[in-house]
Image: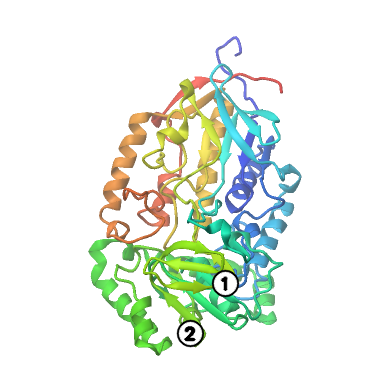
Amino acid sequence: MSSNGIHPVIAPSVAIIGCGFGGLAAAIELRRHGIDDYTVFEKGDGVGGVWRANHYPGAACDVPSSTYSYSFELESEWSQRFGTQDEIRAYLERTAAKYGVTPKIRTNSEVVAATFDERTGQWLIELASGRQHRFDAVICATGQLSRPKVPDLPGRDTFQGPQFHSAEWDDSVDLTGKRVAVVGSGASAVQIVPAIVDQVAALHVVQRSPNWIGNKWNHKTSPGIRRLLRTVPGLARAQHNLEWLWYESRVPLIYNRFDPLRVGLHAWLRFKIRREISDPVLRRKVTPDYKAGCNRLLLSSDWYPALDRPHVSVHTHGVSEVTPTGLVLADGTTVEADVIVWCTGFSATEYLAPIDITGRDGRKLHAEWKSGPEAYLGVTVSGYPNLFMIYGPNTGSLTNTIIFLLEKQARYARMAIEYSARSGKWLDVRKNVQNEYNERLQHRLSQTVFTSGCAGWYHTPDGKVVAVWPGSHIAYARATARVDLSAYQTGIREVVQQ
């Protein structure tokens, strides 16, 4: 501290955990505002996050790629309206290189623990290798869908053929002429099943509960259109904005008071089932009994026709046991299979796991979150100073592109870190502020379709909705437009040489 009591500006050091869309958004936001002392820790072998890990057949975006891009780095070269996995990963790699982030990335560097040092006001980051590093701030961008979940079923280790999770696809396994069991009917299965249906001899889809599925209005992008998007000033921006506004217009459908509109949506979705499936028994199996929007509305123009094929069977009872030659379902049905593909989702409500995070007074984040994770604005948590989250609790996007929200969270974290640098203090959101925010949040959620009752990953086992944002993207941008310092308590941080 100087003689006049004012702290000099201290260049902050920042750890970013994760190198998908969220981690890159944070790194680029810092760099664009002059904060260059940051390190990106990535447990995998490269850039991309879920778009590096998920390389199963048919993997592609289900949001138009004109909006599933950073607003500051629009891409004109998508081969189709909904970009494929390899295109999205390549886009992230190019963007990381263009904005100078690549040299800051430490791949194969899994963070296993983060501990706040109250003496110095810094975070001690520990890697799986045992190495430790100190940082003034931490931005966690590990994502919701990064930890594959495979059910712990009796006999699973006795199966004699290949088995793997969709996010850990085994490219060495040839499915040609095989009997394949796909366990799950969510977003991954909806892409995988149509991609492999012509290759396999028999396909068994084990469905826990059906999903509402709309048309995926996809189309190839001609070289001429790509050339126009690349060369005509403002055209790519106009395309981005129009798609963004179209998706933002769907926000009313998350509110129960707009159920009259949902009647029309249900009629359209049921018409799609009747048009694409000839078997009336199969139609009943794949028709949900809950409100559209309660769970994620999926997009596919190939899913229902694939299920209606003669060599495809849809089972509506879950798996009770795995045998050496297949599956036993809850109703006693035996499914013989050569390969099992687990499309059973992710541990979506276990935010930041399995990182051991210790805050002030030795508190443990995951112990405090045992009844469900919660945060202030989905970004900060009381008791964990200068710890910020990208894609934190209750910030999931269902009506528009998640990339917009990630950018706003990165902006908020950057503004808070800048204040910390100017003041020489750490920021810790006040507990009462966090509690009041989450009370208001849960009240708003009670008025939405998310609490109308359906199976899915938005909820904890006791029904608390922790995954989704109950409003428009515009509303979230306004809520995070500035850092309200009155919501935070502060403490002095010191400079410690590593």
Label 1: which secondary element: loop
> Residue 411, position in %: x, y?
53, 44
Position of residue 154 in the picture relative to residue 157 (left or right): left
Q: Residue furthest right?
A: 103
Task: Tell whether 213 sits left or right of 338.
Answer: left
Quadrant position of residue 276: bottom left
The N terminus appears in which quarter of the rendering?
top right
Residue at numbered disc 1: 82
Q: Pick the residue in front: 235 or 13.
A: 13
The kind of residue tagged 1 is Phe
Choose top left, top right, bottom left or bottom right for residue 259.
bottom left
- Numbered badge on residue 305: 2
Instruction: Give residue 15's position: percent from left, percent from top.
Output: 63, 36
Q: What's the residue at 57%, 50% (across, down)?
A: 22
Q: Viewed as shown, does residue 235 lie left or right of 402?
A: right
The x and y percentages for residue 167 are 59, 60
Q: In front here: 9 or 117?
A: 117
Tell me the mark number nearer the camera, choosing from 1 and 2.
Answer: 2
Q: Is residue 99 above or below residue 189?
A: above
Q: Dot 1 surroundings within 10 Å: few (below 14), some, or many (20 or more)?
A: many
